[in-house]
Amino acid sequence: MRPADPSRHRRRARRGVVAVLMATVAAGLTSCGERTATEPGIPTFDTTPNVVLVVDDDGLRFTGGDGSVSTDPARWSTGTLLAVRNDGDEPHRVQGGTRFDTGVLEPGEQTLVLFDEALTAPTTITVTDDDDPSRTVTFELVPGPRP
């Protein structure tokens, strides 16, 4: 009878260890993509504006957006996302009373305003161009979720 080759046993043992390690790594990688209901996550938020307020050298006007809210009459529910965009050649600052202030918007810049406050009654908001307070637009913000 021939004695057992010790290198053969070592090769078999190494293969076994490698197989166990590969299985462990594979199991770990497949579980990386799984999420449970209790794990925290980053909430997503659609930044497509519901309505756009354009400010330029001619004044203020509501336009476009995603078409989900009315601009004539300008009446929106809580949860409406407004984009204020400077289409003019000069910097503009737009204020909505105490509810928002865009700061100075350079030509081509825009900022987003989310109306997320809880309201118990409709409220009218007057928006002014800080450069010329005679340029105004108004809209009504009403309680309730946006449709």
Image: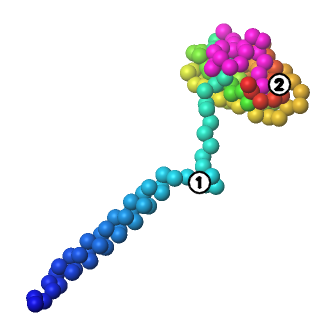
Residue occupied by mark 1: 36
**Measured from the top left, where is residue 136 in percent x and y?**
77, 15
Looking at the image, residue 74 lies above or below residue 119? above
Residue 133: percent from left, percent from top: 77, 17
Element type where label 1 sits in the image: loop
- Going by the picture, which residue comes out furthest to the front? 1
Q: Report the amino acid beneath label 1.
A: Thr
The answer to if 72 sits in the magenta stretch is yes
Question: In the figure, residue 77 lies in which quadrant?
Answer: top right
Mark 1 or mark 2: which is in front?
1
Which residue is drawn at the image coordinates 74% and 27% (left, top)? 146
Which residue range is magenta in the image? 58-78
* Residues packed near mark 1 inside 10 Å, few (<14), some (14 to 19) or many (20 plus): few
For the point 63% across and 15% down, which residue is it? 64
What kind of residue is marked 2?
A: Val
**Residue 142 got which mark?**
2
